[in-house]
Image (cartoon, helix red, strand yellow):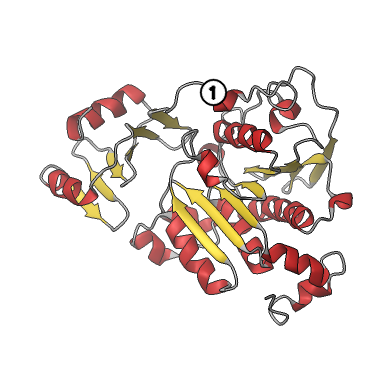
Amino acid sequence: MVSKDRYSRQVLFQPIGEEGQRKLANKKILIVGMGALGTVLANHLVRAGVGHVRFADRDYVEKSNLQRQMLFDEDDVIEALPKAVAAQNRLQKINSDVLVEGIVTDVTLQNIEELMEGVDLVLDGTDNFQTRFLINDACYQKGIPFVYGGAVSSRGMSAIFIPGVTPCLRCFIGGGNSAGQTCDTIGVISPVVDIVASFQAIEALKYLTDNHDVQRKSLITFDVWKHHMYEMKFSKRKENCPTCSLNEYPALQGDQEQTVTSLCGRETVQINLGQKLNIEEWAEKLAKVADVTKTPFLVRANLPEGERLVLFPDGRTLVQGTEDIARAKSLYARYIGL
């Protein structure tokens, strides 16, 4: 049952109305990433009354997040809460009408299908094109729309890609990437994040309430500091696009698991050998050789060499303080074992 008091102002907005509000209550969405974009997206869509909001994130809350990641506070930093857990805690207090489901995981080829099960829409809260192309290909394979967004420095961009209606992200931008520019290398100001995520949320609301006639068929890009804005109209899909024309979905092919990944711009290497970790046992082992902090969700070990290991129960280990994969693997082998 839709709460008239809670959503009264939204229901008064004629394009949504009572019928649109009922549609929202019956929808399920997935947000990939619960950082800057993801927290704004989740905040908007949980408050709007989307019935089931699922999100997945692999990281935990750090002090540098608080400048722009709106669902977190200093207590989350002190407790080293995973972002998915901290966000779920906060959002459940905002709207009890909504099923809020936070999942602590790295979104990969192995779990993307399970995470997308039953969803009507996928929203991009990520910070890298490797994951975006994975989402893009999985969405087009399943016929599920994908709302893209990106923000760095004072620049942002957003678009909704709908299978059978628009070209896909891969088709539209080719093998594009961020040219090495990330929030961790050139920074970002908070207002641009809010603007990008708001554009994403608007297109999501249009789609989820069946207002397809006003769905934007373009990618917008803007610089809020220089007050520039540009709209790139969608062209026809390319006949040789491996995703939306040839149905090859390259991001869904290849190795079943990428065990070692350098997280661009973060001085962090992620290692995942596919075996779950007992963090209670590892806290005891590492405490003999490192300064260890344990929470119910992770173990952090500050190593004598200067780097830090962060172990998660799902089998992931972050080696923080280096982007050198060889160095990270050496430290992992020394303290965890290969």
Where, quadrant-wise, is the N terminus in this rendering? bottom right
Question: Residue 221 in the image: x percent, y percent?
Answer: 76, 41
Of 67 and 315, the residue lying toward us: 315
Where, quadrant-wise, is the C terminus in this rendering? top left
Q: Quadrant of residue 187?
A: top right
- Report the side of 86 relative to 242 (left or right): left
Q: Amino acid at mark 1?
A: Gln
Question: In the image as oriented, which residue stretches furthest toward the bottom?
Answer: 5
Residue occupying the point 56% across, 72% down: 94
- Report the side of 1 relative to 326 (left or right): right
- For the question of whether residue 336 can be seen, the reply is yes
Question: In the image as oriented, which residue stretches furthest toward the top?
Answer: 240
Of 131 and 310, the residue lying toward us: 131
- Report the side of 290 relative to 263 (left or right): left
Residue occupying the point 59% across, 61% down: 52
Q: Secondary structure at mark 1?
A: loop
> Dot 1 corresponds to which residue?
253
Residue occupying the point 60% across, 37% down: 135
Question: Residue 76 in the image: x percent, y percent?
Answer: 40, 62
Question: In the image as oriented, which residue stretches furthest toward the left?
Answer: 288
> Are there few (<14), some (14-19), or many (20+) residues within 10 Å of tag 1?
few
